[in-house]
Image (cartoon, rainbow, N blue to C red):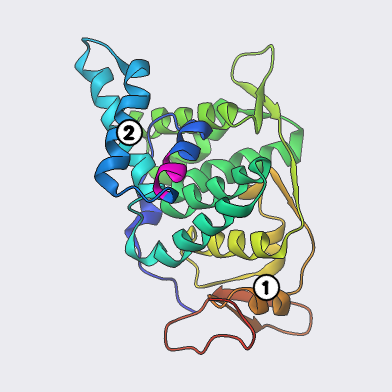
Amino acid sequence: MSARPNRRYNQIGLDRLVRLKWLERTAYLFLAGNEAPAVKTALQEDLQKMFRSNNTKIRGSLDKTITILMKIWVRPPHDLHPLHREGLKLLSHLPRKDHIAVHWGMAMAVYPFWGNIAAHVGRLLRLQGTAVASQVQRRVREQYGERDTVSRAAQRVLRSFIDWEVLKETSKKGIYTAGLSLAIAQVEVIAWLAEAFLHAHPNGSVALRTVLDSTSLFPFRLSPISADHLVAVSGRLDVLRHGLDQDLIMLRTKSQPAAKGSGS
C-alpha cells in the first residue's frame, strides 16, 4: 500500500515543553463539556503564573504551549477525530496511572515529531542502556535538517519525557536512563495505540510485531496480541496477510466495511 500524503510527517510543530499534567488538565476540561474557547481561557488562567514575565518571548511561549495542548485534545486534525473521540473515552474510564499511554499516543499522532524523538531515544536505550542527548540531536537533524530550531525542539521533547518520568537524568549532563515502564494488557488500549502509531507514520501498513516492539512506544510494554483480535476490537483497523508468518495492520478506509463484531 502506498504512503498516505500528509505534511504532518515532515513538520516539527511541537517545540515547547509539554507537561503531562497540562495535557491531563486539557483533556479533563474538554471531557467536562467545555467548548474550545472556555478550555483555552481556563488553560491561560492555570498556566499564566508559570509564564508571567515582561519578556514577550516568554508570554509568547504560553500561547504556543496552549496551542499545542489544544491541538492534541481539543482541536486535532480532521483525520484524527475518530482517534480523538476514542482516546477521550479511554481517559474517562481508565485508571489515572494508565492515562499516560493515551496522552502519549495522541501526542504522537498529532505531532509525529514526538514519536520520532521517542523512537531514537528508545532505540538508544535498547542498544546501550542510556540515551545521550547529543546522539538523539544528531539523528533528528539528519532527518529534519541542520537547523537550530530542530535542536531546540528536540531538547524540549526530551525535557517533556523527563517531566513524564519516562526518562531519568543521570549525574552526567545530557545522558538519560529509562524511567517509568508501564505494562499494558488491555486490548482496547493496545488497539488504540496501534491506531495512533499508524497515524504517526507515513506508511499505509506496518507489521504488527513492528508496532508491538516499536521504540517510539519505549515507555510501554504491550502484551502480545493477534492482528485478528485487534481488528475485532477496533473498527478502524484492518489486517493484511503477508506471507505465512507476518500480519500487516493498516488504517481502515471509509469504503471498507468494519470487521464483524468490532466497535465503533
- From the top left corner, tell me how far across and down residue 82 is, in percent: 44, 67
Residue 190, disc:
none
Which amino acid type is shown beneath numbered disc 1?
A: Leu
Locate residue 246: give its quadrant.
bottom right
Q: Nearer the viewer, residue 82 or 79?
A: 82
For mark 1, give the secondary structure.
helix
The answer to whether residue 13 is visible is no
Q: In this rendered view, identify the residue nearer to me: 45 or 254.
A: 45
In the figure, is residue 201 to the left or right of 208?
Answer: left
Vertical order, 225 against 240 (above or below): above
Q: Amino acid at mark 2?
A: Ala
Is 32 displayed left or right of 125 in the figure? Answer: left
Compare marks 1 and 2 and give the one earlier in the sequence: 2
Label 1 – label 2 distance at C-alpha: 37 Å
Residue at image mark 2? 42
152 on left or right of 129: left
Report the residue marked by disc 1: 230
The structure residue drawn at horizontal position 56% and vertical position 27%, both measured from the top left corner, is 163
Q: Is the residue 217 above or below the residue 181 in the image?
A: below
Q: From which residue to which does the magenta span run?
A: 26-30
Identify the residue shown where x is 70% and y is 75%. Answer: 227
